[in-house]
Amino acid sequence: MKSVGHDSLNTGSTLDIDGKTYHYFSIPEAEKHIGDVSRLPVSLKVLLENVLRFEDGHSYSTEDAKAIAGWLAQGSSTQEVPFKPARILMQDFTGVPAVVDLAAMRDGILKLKGDPQKVNPLVPVNLVIDHSVMVDVSGTPDALQKNVTIEFERNGERYAFLRWGQEAFENFSVVPPGAGICHQVNLEYIAQAVWTAKVDGKDYAYPDTLYGTDSHTTMVNGMGVLGWGVGGIEAEAAMLGQPIAMLIPDVIGFKLTGKLPEGATATDLVLTVTQMLRKKGVVGKFVEFFGPALDHLPVADRATIANMAPEYGATCGFFPVDALTLDYLRQTGREEHRIKLTEDYLKAQGMFRTPDMADPIFTDTLELDLSTVVPSLAGPKRPQDRVSLKDATSAFETELTGGLGVPANDAHKKVPVAGTNYEIGHGDVVIAAITSCTNTSNPAVLIAAGLVARKARALGLKPKPWVKTSLAPGSQVVTDYLDRAKLSEDLDALGFNTVGYGCTTCIGNSGPLADTIVDAIENNKLVAVSVLSGNRNFEGRISPNVRANYLASPPLVVAYSLLGTMREDITTTPLGTSKDGKPVYLKDIWPTNKEIADLMGSSISREEFIDRYSKITLGTKEWQALKVATGSETYKWDPASTYVQNPPYFQDITPEPVSKGDIVGARVLALLGDNITTDHISPAGAIKKTAPAGLYLSEHQVAAKDFNSYGSRRGNDRIMVRGTFANIRIKNEMLPGTEGGLSRHYPDGAEGSIYDVAMKYKEEGTPLVVFGGKEYGMGSSRDWAAKGTLLLGIRAVIAESFERIHRSNLVGMGVLPLLFKEGVTRKTLNLKGDETIDIEGLDAITPRMTLTMTITRADGATQDVPLLCRVDTLDEVEYYRHGGILQYVLRGMTKAA
C-alpha cells in the first residue's frame, strides 16, 4: 500500500500493540455516518474497510461506503464498488506470462515515450513455483531427486526469467521450486490475517486480502483472509494500482452444525458442501460460513472447504477469524505480536467471530449437520458429482455404459498387459495420487493416509501392479510430521514415495504411465480410472490415457490403490489377503479419529513451521546455480527461445485507443457445448507431437521428450495460440463425431486444426466468433484461455452463461462476452457453423446493454437475435475501448508521468 485516502468520514483511529501504534480506518466510526452495519457479513465488512481506507472522492467515494451499508436492507445490491487487494499471489504457470506481460509493458511504455520504471508492482507480489514438477518417476526412493533434476532440465530457462523478474521489479518475490504448493505456502506462511504497511511514516493495519492467479486462492479464506482467483490480466492491473470494480455480491450464509462422525473426513465434508452449493447456485456470490460447528472446526478443515469454492461456483468461501484461527497462526509459527494485533484489530472492527455473536444477515442461507456426512467420492468428470462410497461402484457401472459410452457387451472386457502376468479392463485404477493443496494442507487426512498404509503394510498388502502411486506434499512441513510419526516409511513401502513438492497430478502433471499400460488402454479403448485427492477431475485433465477421474480423501486413495478397480464395492470387497491368508477389508485398515488425533498431537510442532519457512527462499542447489541476466530495466528477448517471447499486445500501441469497429461478416470458429472448461480452451497438460504446438516445437528443433507441457510454455505466445482449443477431448459441433481441436473453413468447408483454420481466416481479414453453452469457461483462472482467444482473431464469444473469472478475462483482453437471452441457445437457433455473423453498435457499448446479432445463413436467410453484452461495469467499458485492461493501464501510466 503506497497511499491512503482522504478519510472524509473521519474514521481514522489507533491501536496500541506492545507499545507500537497502528493507525486504521474504523468501521464503528463510519457507522456514525452510514448507519449500523454490525450484522453485515464479515466478508462485506472487509470490502467496506477497503473503501474507507482508499476513499479519495474519485475512484473511491463515501457513496461506495453507503452502498455497502445499504446492502443490508435487501441482502442484495445492484451497486458496484472498487476493490484493491493488499497483495497478489501467483504460481509459475500464471506467473510466467504475467512477468512476460510486465516486461512487454516496459517495452510498450517506451513506445509511448514513458518511463519503464513506472511499470512496477505497487503491492507485494509473491510467486510460488509449484506447477512445473511432473511425476516422471514414482514409487522409488530416488523419485523426488530424479523429478527435481528433470524439472530443472525442462524449465531452467523459465526459472532464470523469473529470477530476472525478481531482480528487475520492486515488490516482487519468488519462492523457488520444491518448497510447496502456492496455496499451502500462503496458508502456512505468507498470509497474516491482518496486513500492515507504512505510509508517510505511519504504520497502518488493515485486513489481509489478495487476488491470486489461480482459482484455488480461496483456500486462504479458511483463515479469515478474503481473496479469490482472478485472471493474470486482472492481477497485473491490480498490482499496478488499478482498483477493480465489482458488483456488491450476494452473500450466501452456510450454517454448519454438529460434528463429523467416525470414519468421515474433511474431504468427504468438502465434497458434500460442493454438491450442496452447486445445487443451490452460488456463481458470482460470496459464501460465508457460520454456526456452532465453527467452535470446533479446525482451520485445516475450513481451508479444505474454502479451497473448493471454484468447484461450488462461488467467488469465495469465507470463514471469519476466531479463536481457532489464532491457534492456527500460533501453531504455524506466526509472530506473537502479529497474532495480538490480529485479535485486537478485528475485535475493534467487529470482524472477530465469537460463539455468542448474532448471526449476520445474509442474502439466503442453507445448513448442513456435519454428523450426516458420509465417506464419498466425486466423479468421474466433475467435482460436484458426489457419490457416497457405498454407491460408488453402482454409479460407475451406470456411467460406464452411459456418459462414458462403453457398449454393454464390451463392459467386462479384460486384456493382457504385455510382459506381465495380469490383465486390465474398464474401471481399473491406474493412477492413485495423494496430491493437491486441497488435502495435503490438512494434517488429519495425511496422517489418516499414513495410518491406512501402516495397517495395510503390517498385514502384507500391496497396491495392484497396474497402479501408479505417488505422494506430492503441499509443503515440506508435511514430510516433517510424517517422518516424526514414522508414517513416511509405511507410505514408501506401498509406493507412495514423495515425488515432488507441487501440484503434480491434480493439474495434469501425472507423468507417463508405463508404455505397456498405455498400449493396453489405447489399443482396446479402455476406460481407465484415476483416484486422486485433488479438486479437479475434468475429462482429459489428469492424464490423456485416463477418462474417469475420482476425487477422494488421501486414505481412500491408498485404499483404492490396494483394490485396484472401481468395479468392486470397496466397502464390502476384500482389498487383498493378509500374510496369514485372511481377507482384509477396508474396515480392517481404517484408522479411528482418536488414532489420527493422537498422532497429530505428537508429530506436529510450531518449531517445524518456523524452521522450514525460515529457509523457504533459498531453493535447491539447482535453483542457486541458475544463470540470471541482470542490469537491465527491460528484458533482452531471445528470438530463439521457445519458452519466453515478447507478446504482440503492445507492439502497435498508440497514445489514444483506436476503434476496432463493429463485427461484420464474422465466421464461426467453433460451436461448443455445456461445461467448456478453461482446460478445454487452453490445456495445461502434454503437447501432442501432431498438434500445431508440437509441430511448431519440432520445427524449432525441440525433441518430443522436451516438449514439456502447455502450462510451462505460457511465456511463449507462439506456442500458446497454437494450443488454444487444442484439448484432446474438446468437441466442436461443426464436425459431429470428432474430438480434438478441429474446425472447418468456409465457404470451402475445408477441415483443419482450429489454429490453422483461424490463421487462414486471419489472412483473409475475416473476424471470428465462438458459440458455447452453459458455464462457458468454468475451471481454472487461466488468462491464456482469453489471450489465446484474442490471438486467434476471435472478436466475441456467445454463450448461455459464463464462469466469473473467464468472463472478466475476456473483457480484459478486449474480447466481447455475449449472452443469449433466456431460452435461446445455439441449438434453438439451429446453428451449423457455416453462417456469417454481424454485431453492430460496438463503439457505443454501455454496461450490460442489449446488442443485436444478425445471423446470415448459407442460403442467404437472415435472423436477428438479441444478446446481453456482459461488459458489466463502466471500467470494463473502458478496458474494451482500449483493447484490453493492460493497454488501458499502460496509457494511464504514460499520462501520469
Image (cartoon, helix red, strand yellow):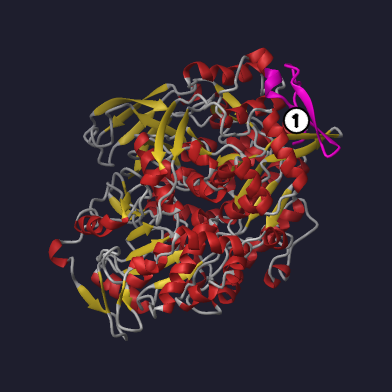
Q: Nearer the viewer, residue 494 or 663?
A: 494
Q: In the rendered structure, which amino acid carries the disc numbered 1?
A: Ala
Task: Please say if 162 is above or below 321.
Answer: below
Residue 50, picture quadrant: top right
Tell me if residue 119 can be seen.
no
Q: Is residue 16 magenta?
A: yes
Residue 123, picture quadrant: top right
Q: Is residue 729 magenta?
A: no
Q: Which residues are magenta?
A: 1-30
Q: Residue furthest left?
A: 409
Q: Nearer the viewer, residue 757 or 721?
A: 721
- Is 680 displayed left or right of 124 in the figure? left
Residue at figure coordinates x 60%, y 74% from the top left: 149
The residue indicated by pointer 1 is 896
Location of residue 501 in the rendering, given as x and y in whole percent from the top left corner: 58, 64
- Is 524 displayed left or right of 190 in the figure? left
Q: What kind of element bears circle 1?
A: helix
Residue at figure coordinates x 26%, y 63% from the top left: 569
Tell me if residue 839 can be seen.
yes
Q: Residues within 10 Å of mark 1 (few under 14, many from 20)?
A: few
Location of residue 24 in the rendering, given as x and y in whole percent from the top left corner: 75, 29
Residue 460, picture quadrant: bottom left
Location of residue 217 in the rendering, given as x and y in whole percent from the top left corner: 56, 46
Quarter of the picture containing the N terminus is top right
Quarter of the picture containing the C terminus is top right
Residue at figure coordinates x 64%, y 67% from the top left: 156
Location of residue 186 in the rendering, given as x and y in whole percent from the top left corner: 63, 51
Label total for image: 1
- Is 39 displayed left or right of 741 in the figure? right
